[in-house]
């Protein structure tokens, strides 16, 4: 949780070994992120803050492409359920989708392999209020099944609705970590 420019996205990029820390280490699943990123990434679903996907492909083709990177990890019934719940047409071309519907594609991509850890950079950005509500429902269900959800936000009510713990960051510095009910 933090204001724009606080370092939330940078923290996520460090976690995913997309950038390297100047000092210190980042660990996920007990492993340093830069020592075995492929084994860590296989257990993670990720939604970047700025999603770039193939505009000429259909939603289904994009999912199939990403699924080919994780053979056997995508259940077709889960894909269908996510598309139905998010009101996302699987045969639509990505380039013809609105910003909110592109965000839904990114959410489906992050969730589709049912990862142990979800890392989401402002997942409700660009979504209409009904889609925002449904995304939170889906995230709660995934959390209740045992997955860990790590997401960035500058919206306290959003954090309160899904998180157990919150870390507050300002100007690249971690300023507090607490239980959500301790900050309200």
Image (spheres, grey):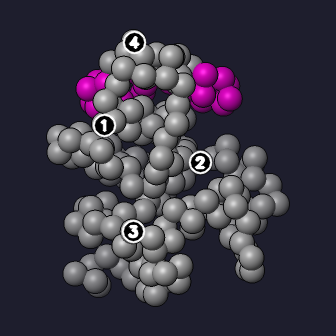
Of circles 3 and 4, the one toward us is: 3
In the picture of the structure, the residue carrying the numbered disc 2 is 44
Circle 3 SS class: loop
Say which residue appears at 75% left-offset and 53% top-offset.
37
In the picture of the structure, the residue carrying the numbered disc 4 is 91
Q: Answer with mark 3 or mark 2, whichever residue precedes in sequence.
A: 3
Give coordinates of residue 81: x percent, y percent: 34, 26
Say which residue appears at 30% left-offset and 44% top-offset.
126
Give coordinates of residue 151: x percent, y percent: 44, 59
Q: Answer with mark 2 or mark 4, whichever residue precedes in sequence.
A: 2
Q: Where is 68 relative to 47, above or below? A: above
Say which residue appears at 68% left-offset and 29% top-offset.
69
In the picture of the structure, the residue carrying the numbered disc 3 is 4
In the picture of the structure, the residue carrying the numbered disc 1 is 100
Q: Answer with mark 1 or mark 3, whichever residue precedes in sequence.
A: 3
Say which residue appears at 27% left-offset and 42% top-offset.
127
Q: Alpha carbon of mark 3 to alpha carbon of mark 2: how far? A: 25 Å
Q: Alpha carbon of mark 2 to alpha carbon of mark 1: how far? A: 23 Å
Residue 182's image quarter? bottom left
Q: Answer with mark 2 or mark 1, whichever residue precedes in sequence.
A: 2
Residues drawn in magenta: 65-88
Q: State the quadrant of the N terminus.
A: bottom left
Q: State the quadrant of the C terminus.
A: bottom left
Q: Alpha carbon of mark 1 to alpha carbon of mark 3: how far? A: 20 Å
């Amino acid at each position: 949780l933090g204001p724009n420019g606080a370092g939330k996205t940078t923290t996520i990029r460090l976690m995913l070994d997309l950038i390297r820390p100047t000092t210190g280490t980042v660990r996920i699943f007990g492993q340093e992120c830069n020592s075995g990123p492929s084994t860590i990434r296989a257990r993670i679903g990720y939604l970047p803050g700025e999603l770039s996907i193939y505009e000429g492909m259909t939603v289904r083709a994009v999912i199939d492409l990403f699924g080919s990177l994780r053979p056997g990890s995508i259940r077709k019934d889960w894909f269908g359920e996510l598309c139905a719940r998010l009101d996302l047409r699987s045969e639509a071309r990505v380039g013809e989708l609105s910003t909110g519907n592109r965000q839904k594609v990114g959410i489906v991509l992050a969730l589709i392999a049912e990862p142990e850890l979800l890392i989401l950079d402002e997942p409700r950005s660009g979504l209409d209020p009904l889609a925002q509500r449904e995304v939170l429902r889906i995230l709660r269900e995934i959390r209740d099944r045992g997955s860990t959800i790590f997401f960035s936000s500058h919206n306290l009510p959003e954090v309160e609705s899904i998180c157990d713990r919150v870390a507050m960051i300002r100007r690249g510095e971690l300023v507090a970590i607490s239980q959500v009910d301790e900050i309200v």
